[in-house]
Amino acid sequence: MEKKSRILVVDDNDSVRQLLQKMLEKLGYVVETASDGFEALSKLVFDIDLILLDILMPGMDGFAVVKEIRTQAEYKDIPIIMVTGLSSREDRIRAVEVGANDFISKPIDMTEIKVRTTSLLKMKNAQDDLKRHHKELERIVQRRTLALRESMQNVVTAQRMLQNAHMETIHRLVVAAEFKDTGTASHIKRMSHFSAMLATLINLSPNEVEMILHASPLHDIGKIGTPEEILLKPGKLNKPEWNLMQQHPVMGSQILTGSSSPLLQTGEIIAISHHEKWNGTGYPFGFQKEDIPLNGRICAIADVFDALTSIRPYKKAYSNDRALKIMEKGAGYHFDPQLFTLFTDNMKQVEDIQQRYAAAA
Ligand SMILES: [Fe+2]
Ligand SMILES: [Fe+2]
């Protein structure tokens, strides 16, 4: 059922008020009345659709009432018809200036009332519909924004979980290979941090540093395929054993090859190149100098230094000084000389890493 429009009649003259009320009720409207401007303003809360407003009233005249209504955001769109005995041009101009919509002159004619109120109420209803529509749209947008935010959050969470699972899988794979080799996972922790330290010192981007930190533990993943009696042999390896041992970079790269993961791709490069030597006497390819991938050159220093300073089946742990002395002879033929200098210049950081990831940990 359509809601009846509510009209507020404001006039200080009782008989005019009653006459207007009667006429409007006959036209099917619900009528509120007010005998002055103050009462009129207080009755706006009753969901008023249209105001019939006398101009000449004691206290606050019709112009002042219109002005006041037009300043209130909630009521500023209510149509106002000024009712007046005066028909002077100045009054009409002033009424328009303060924001009235139309005029009716006294004496009041029923047909005129009907025509004026009908057209203004139509406008008011259309405005109300539009406002409702706007509010509804706002609600829909708000709901959708919220839903979008939630689903984005879900995607981010899923991506994080996937990334964590990815990292964990790699880590466990590395630990499996490392246990077989050294019986401890602390070697890969230290060598990966030494590698990240060097990467930072040569100003690689944070992204690249993080990549080498997580990919360098994969350097010896190929040892999964190396027989344990060779890995754990206390003495020197004979020629066939050494040949088998030298297969681990190739086996590592075969395990990692073809991945779409940048981390595994970096791991593959490190696995295949960490036993290359600066002067081209390394394996498996015998690459020289800058032909050896940078990450491989970095990991070679980190790996050898940690191997020398750790216990291995065929040797005891050397001190840092002794390890560096041994390695120094290799700077320029085994290791990238600039990287090696950077490493030796930053022994404080190296020692910090050693303490943080000591073998017993
Ligand atoms: Fe290796
Ligand atoms: Fe290693």
Image (cartoon, rainbow, N blue to C red):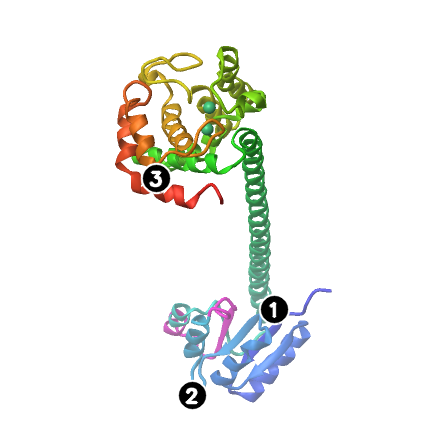
46 versus 247 height, above or below: below
224 versus 105 height, above or below: above
Q: Which of 167 and 99 is in front in this view?
A: 167
Label 3 belongs to which residue? 350
Residue 303 is at least partly visible in this image: yes
140 versus 286 height, above or below: below
Please tell me whether mark 2 sits on a helix, a strand or a loop.
loop
Q: Is 331 included in the stretch rendered in magenta?
A: no
The magenta stretch is 73-93
Please tell me whether mark 3 sits on a helix, a strand or a loop.
helix
Q: Which residue type does callout 3 highlight? A: Val
Q: Which residue type does callout 2 highlight? A: Gly
Q: How far apart are marks 3 and 2 (CA)?
A: 89 Å
Q: Residue at x 39, y 25 (%)?
A: 300
Q: Which of 207 and 88 is in front in this view?
A: 207
- Ligand 2 closer than 8 Å to label 1 CB: no
Q: Earlier in the sequence, mark 1 or mark 2?
A: 2
Label 2 belongs to which residue? 59
Q: Which residue type does callout 1 highlight? A: Lys
Please tell me whether mark 1 sits on a helix, a strand or a loop.
helix
Where does the image place residue 343, in percent across and percent down from the top left?
30, 33
Q: Which mark is residue 114?
A: 1
Frontmost of labels 3 and 2 is 3
Q: Which of marks 1 and 3 is nearer the N terminus?
A: 1
Where does the image place residue 228, in percent across and percent down from the top left?
58, 23
The quarter of the picture where residue 59 lies is bottom left
Confirm or deny contact between disc 1 and disc 3 (CB under 8 A).
no
Which residue in the rendered view is the most extreme toward the front? 235
